[in-house]
Amino acid sequence: MPPESTSHSLQIPTPLTPKPPSRLPNAYSLSADVLIFLSGAAAALLLFYVFSSFILPPTPYPVSSNQFQKPSSSDTPSFYDDPSLSYSLPPSPSVSDWDTKRRLWRHLHPFPPNRILMLTGSQPSPCPNPIGDHLLLRFFKNKVDYSRIHGIDVFYNSALLHPSMPSFWAKLPLLRAAMIAHPEAEWLWWVDSDAAITDMEFQLPLQRYQSYNLVVHGWPNLVYENRSWTALNAGVFLLRNCQWSLDFLARWARLGPHNPDYKHWGEVLRAELPDKLFPDSDDQSALIYLLIKEKDRWGEKIHLENEYYFEGYWVEIVGSLQGITQNYLDMEKREPELRRRRAEKVTAAANRQSRENRLPAATAPSGWRRPFITHFTGCQPCSGKHNEIYSGEKCFEGMVRALTFADDQVLRSYGFRHSDLLNESVVELPFDFPVAV
């Protein structure tokens, strides 16, 4: 007898028999399904990217890595936090233990060794000479070109940092401030505004100066025996960023115009240097005086460079520039390696290496290699008040020749050169120049 049904009894449904599919899926339908799925996934990812850009903070652009720089802790103290630190020459407070302070700073901010900072500049006001500012611009472009090619930093100053130290003395306060502002620089390279770099391939032989703190163009016999005012030239020099240099700058500046005994020092220097032409104390005479009178204190660290044109007198150089150009072109005609086109950044190094075995007198002033620096002493391009032994026309033509001579070396990497050293127009160079003309 079947049990009685109650409200709690389970109702077992009758199982349904599934219908067989009307057709089996084929390869075409599977491909379509996959395509639809991928399209949907792509659309979903796109929507996620769009909406996340409004919600999530943007990812910063990647900073190019530099093996010589690394971020330092912002709360790490340094000498810059010392309120007594002064960028000025004495009588402002002097800087002590600079070598240690600089070494600690460089530990936090590693840079490549032997970094160079080139310093140059001009007066704050416009040049009285109508073409003076144009000439200074060309001289500055020349220095920027060389520095770009060789990876050198440049600072151009037109501010008088010490009111009582104008004219040729103005470089000393700038050097002091630059040493403090640029502890990463091992060398500060002062180059007068009227000096042109006329060999864009040449590289300063810093390895020769490892034992020195000041390198200036000059001759020991003219300093110590002849005591000549032209024994050296203070318009171009290298100064190491170190405590010795800070002390030397302070001593050098004491012979300058901010000294109450400035007039007296002018008389002393003129008596000490028989060929000195004017009575004022100037930076060049003062430097020679310190070498003579305080050689034991400073002389060991000062190198008088005369094995190449670290700074050359323009009168003996500009007349030879056309011949030097032809000598280089003749060499390039013989040497296919020197005719190769290269990027500007590597041209100087490649050509310099190629010429080393072909120029036995490459660094000597008597050789036929390009002079490194041509200095237009006495021409005064800004004021126009040139030395009376030259004509204004001779100075102007010499400056144009030297600047164009240097500019042709730069333009060569861009496929051009001037048609003549006194011509502003340029011509495009054919492939395999100068064989093909």
Image (cartoon, rainbow, N blue to C red):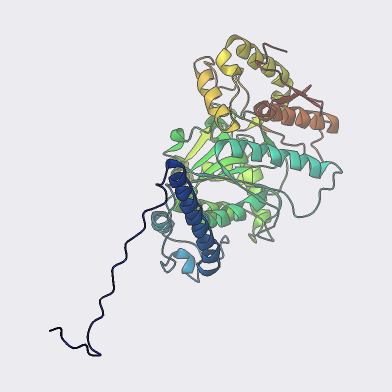
Residue 160 location (% of width, % of height): 69, 57
**Which residue lies at the image location 36% right of the left edge and 54% below the top edge?**
20
Mark yes or no: residue 60 visible. no
Task: Please state if 153 lies on the left or on the right of 298 as rendered.
Answer: right
Q: Quadrant of residue 153?
A: top right
Residue 133: image quadrant is top right
Seen from the viewer's position, the closer of residues 234 and 337 is: 337
Q: Does any portion of residue 175 appear in the rendered image? A: yes
The C terminus sits in image quarter: top right
> Furthest-left residue in view?
1
Q: Is residue 154 left or right of residue 295?
A: right
**Outermost residue toward the top in this view:** 334
Residue at x 41%, y 66% (from the top left corner): 76
Could you tell me which quadrant the N terminus lies in? bottom left
Left or right of 302: which side holds 367? right
Rendered view: 98 above or below 131 = below
Name the residue rendered at 53%, 26% in the picture: 307
Vertical side of 355 occupied by 106: above or below: below
Judging depth in this view, the residue of 130 and 63 nearest the camera is 63
The vertical placement of 336 against 70, above or below, is above
Instruction: Say if 127 sits above or below 393 in the image.
Output: below
Count numbered badges in the picture: 0
Q: Position of residue 252 (x, y in %)?
A: 56, 51
Q: Residue furthest bottom?
A: 7
> Which of 60/64 is in front?
60
Position of residue 401 measured from the top left corner of the image (x, y, whole percent): 76, 27
Residue 40: where, in percent of width, then height?
50, 56
The residue most toward the front is 1
